[in-house]
Image (tube, rainbow, N blue to C red):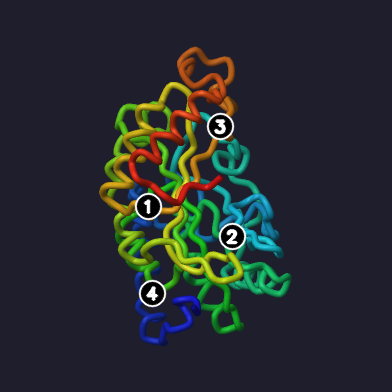
Amino acid sequence: MKPVYLSINKDVENECLEWINKTLQNCCACPRRCGVNRLDNEIGHCKIGRYARVSSAFPHFGEESYLVGWHGSGTIFFSGCNLNCVFCQNYEISQYPSGPECSTEIIAEMMLNLQSLGCHNINLVSPSHVIPQIIEALIIAKQGGLQLPIVYNTNSYDSIDSLKILENWIDIYMPDVKYWEDETARKYSNAKNYPGVVKETIKEMYRQVGDLVINSDGIAQRGLLVRHLVMPGLIHETKEILRWLAKDISENTYINIMEQYRPTYKVLDNPCYFQISRRPTREEMDEVIRFAKLCGLIRIAE
């Protein structure tokens, strides 16, 4: 199964470039729709102007096994973010963008270098606010010989219009679904409309790529891979998310139910976030896994 972007012709590339220019001029790359002119290096909510900032790029062996294989997932970490999660474990780069501004040529070179190292895919982490820059880089990397599947590793707070443009470029969508209730999303990520947005974006991602396809070597080639970080005191929301995935998306959805949550950043020593000031218990995790299976979800990461 070859990456979808290898079938793109010049006309589609030109349409993408027109979309990029229009989107950056009055930024609507994500649901924030800040409206700033990023072509003139104005910055909005994500704190990123014309050029993306890259914190790091390397073969990552800490991702899901179907992405890592034996040579790693070629991960590019973008700085900045369109959410403001009070518990962000990478807040140094998401809330206080670091790393150099990178031209699209440099990002394309990063992709090709990761391919030369034997990585199984190009894994774009926190891409929602730099989709235009990513597409520009992919056009160049494609011309330079890139042939790896592209992984869109997102917080799920994405624009439907942007996702429709990405249909030509993305092989694997890996959304991190966080909340079910508006007030929770407002309190912990400054995005009250997050749950509604996510329901639309996950449906669009699934429409494009379907269930996760894994080749005979155990490497993911195309499809949807959902992550959900279990948070203490929010198990009822986790259950609603799992029920929704099984009923409205697919019982064959591959899901990684993660227990890595720990209180950090603004949660530390702040009584406003008392509910999430601890790690999830073993009992909570076991309850969630049992519930996922009861919902009919059959592809749960171990």
Judging by the rendered image, the residue that carries numbered circle 4 is 16
Is residue 129 visible in this depiction of the protein? no
Judging by the rendered image, the residue that carries numbered circle 3 is 261
Quick one: label 1 or label 4, which is nearer the N terminus?
4
Separation of residues labelled 1 and 4 (CA atoms): 17 Å
Q: Amino acid at mark 2?
A: Leu
Q: Residue 256, how many percent across, how many down?
A: 50, 46
- Marker disc for residue 67: 2
Q: Secondary structure at mark 3?
A: loop
Check disc 3: other Cα within 10 Å, few if <14, some if 14-19, many if 20+.
some
Judging by the rendered image, the residue that carries numbered circle 1 is 158
Q: Amino acid at mark 3?
A: Tyr
Quick one: label 3 or label 2, which is nearer the N terminus?
2
- Marker disc for residue 216: none
Most foreground residue, 115 or 24: 115
Q: Secondary structure at mark 2?
A: helix
* Residue at (55, 54) in percent of width and height: 125
Is residue 296 placed above or below 267 in the rendered structure?
Answer: below
Q: Secondary structure at mark 1?
A: loop
* Residue at (59, 65) in percent of width and height: 218
Quick one: label 3 or label 1, which is nearer the N terminus?
1
Which of discs 1 and 2 lies nearer the camera? The answer is: 2
Quick one: label 4 or label 3, which is nearer the N terminus?
4
Q: Residue 197, how many percent across, how many down?
A: 30, 46
Separation of residues labelled 3 and 1 (CA atoms): 22 Å
Check disc 2: other Cα within 10 Å, few if <14, some if 14-19, many if 20+.
many
Q: Do residues under tags 2 and 4 come within 8 Å of each other at their CB atoms?
A: no
